[in-house]
Amino acid sequence: MIDVLYFAWVRERIGLPKERLDTGAETVAALVDELRAREQRYAMAFSDLSALRVAVDQELTDFDAPLAGAREVAFFPPMTGG
């Protein structure tokens, strides 16, 4: 089981702040593919990965990062300075 967290507009599109999933995905990208296939709202939220950042166990990483042993994946838009 893995906790998947959604922030900002990702959360708004999916309609959930987080969920616990049983996944066989080996990478973040494979997890995204599983999520996209679930429902249209996920497909919309993950339609442009260049507009998203991802963290695995609270460390920023890339979509090709492995999920072996991971407990948490978080998706969020890029941070902007101000």
Image (tube, grey):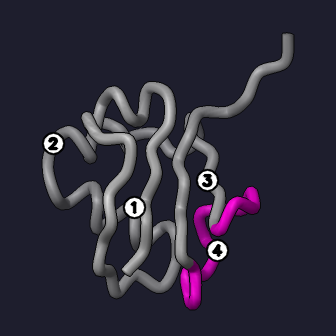
Q: Is residue 7 above or below residue 59?
A: above
Whole-Å distance between the Cαs marked 2 and 1? Answer: 13 Å
Which residue shows up at 48% across the image and 67% down it?
29
**Circle 4: residue type:** Ala
Q: Earlier in the sequence, mark 2 or mark 3?
A: 2
Q: Which mark is residue 40?
A: 2
Q: Nearer the viewer, residue 21 or 30?
A: 21
Residue 66 position by quadrant: bottom right
**Circle 3: residue type:** Val
Q: Which residue is mark 4?
A: 65
Which residue shows up at 70% across the image and 60% down it?
58
Q: Is residue 68 above or below residue 44?
A: below
Q: Earlier in the sequence, mark 2 or mark 4?
A: 2
Q: Earlier in the sequence, mark 2 or mark 1?
A: 1
Q: Main secondary structure of the magenta part?
A: loop
Whole-Å distance between the Cαs marked 4 and 3? Answer: 9 Å
Q: Which residue is mark 1?
A: 32
Q: Which mark is residue 54?
A: 3
Q: Secondary structure at mark 4?
A: loop
Point out the image quarter for the C terminus: top right
Crowdedness of circle 3 by 10 Å Cα count: few (<14), some, many (20+)? many
Point out the image quarter for the N terminus: bottom left
**Circle 2: residue type:** Gln
Disc 2 versus disc 3: nearer the observer: 3
Q: Which residues are magenta?
A: 57-70
Where residue 30 appears, as percent x and y from the top left, is 41, 73
**Contact between labelled residues 3 and 4, with CB atoms less than 8 Å apart:** yes
Whole-Å distance between the Cαs marked 1 and 3? Answer: 11 Å
Crowdedness of circle 4 by 10 Å Cα count: few (<14), some, many (20+)? some
Q: Earlier in the sequence, mark 1 or mark 4?
A: 1
